[in-house]
Image (cartoon, helix red, strand yellow):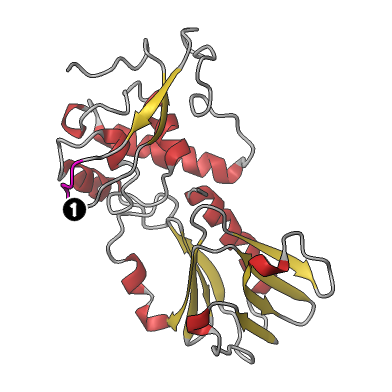
Amino acid sequence: MPEGDTVFLTAKRLHAALAGKILTRSDFRVPRYATADLRGQTIENVGSYGKHLFIRTPTMSVHSHLKLEGSWRVFHRGQRWTKPRVAARVVLGIEQLEAVGFSLGTVEVLPGRDEHRIIDHLGPDLLGPDWDATEAVRRLARHPGRPIGVALLDQRNLAGIGNIYRSEVCFLRRVHPATLVADVPNLLALVNEARRILTEAVDTPVRRPLAYGRARRPCQRCGTPLASELLGETAPDYDRVVQRERGIYYCPRCQPAPAG
């Protein structure tokens, strides 16, 4: 699933292509919004919050979430699309370009004034201008008995981290992902590490993971083979949200497993 840096960069690319331009094509290929027509409206800006992307006109907002396989791509008019046409969920065209949203997990067209309802429940955006580390720590600390690797994926705590970066953050802070939130030595340092990593990923999109996907390969700090296992939330606690098991990667020596 694309993480916050991918969505941020997608929004930046769409903004560069579309902002200030008048829509000449508006094609929503989802039943609920099949009749929506934004032609004639000017795209004011394109932005993101966590993993959510918004294409905004003066009155409306096109909200999308990439989920597992979604992407936005920009083509010149008449250029052959690089993905199957059947996968297109949204086509927004200006005079010489068209932006196509493929395999989007979520598509909504809503009044701009209602955009807040999509993000009000989310924690601070790791890549947002109003990033609030103290608030992120407060939200994480509300459930001290939760594994930190689970809590980091909960977008209600801080928005933008996915499965890759939770392993990277924990590796850099030498914290096993199964460590309970209450036992993490310095939550503030951890969330600031997350902010730093995602910011660097935006500035340098091609980076090699230090832990994620490197099971059985040597730790770059101590040489111990990295390990992997599944971590999720199986008890229906914390507002009855159950997080499915997903892979974590860690160094058994640098990130010893919590006792018990």
Magenta run includes residue 115? no
Q: Position of residue 195 (x, y in %)?
A: 41, 42
Is residue 106 placed above or below 36 in the rendered structure? above
Q: Is 200 displayed left or right of 193 in the figure?
A: right
Q: Position of residue 228 (x, y in %)?
A: 42, 23
Q: Position of residue 54 (x, y in %)?
A: 50, 70
Which residue bears the numbered disc 1?
A: 240
Principal SS element in the magenta part?
loop
Circle 1 crowding by C-alpha within 10 Å: few under 14, some 14–19, many from 20: few
Q: Visible in this render: residue 54?
A: yes
Q: Is 121 displayed left or right of 102 in the figure?
A: left
* Residue closest to the eye, 235 or 132: 235
Q: Visible in this render: residue 23?
A: no
- Provide the residue span drawn in magenta: 235-240
Is residue 160 placed above or below 204 in the rendered structure? below
User: Which quadrant of the view contains residue 129?
Assistant: bottom left
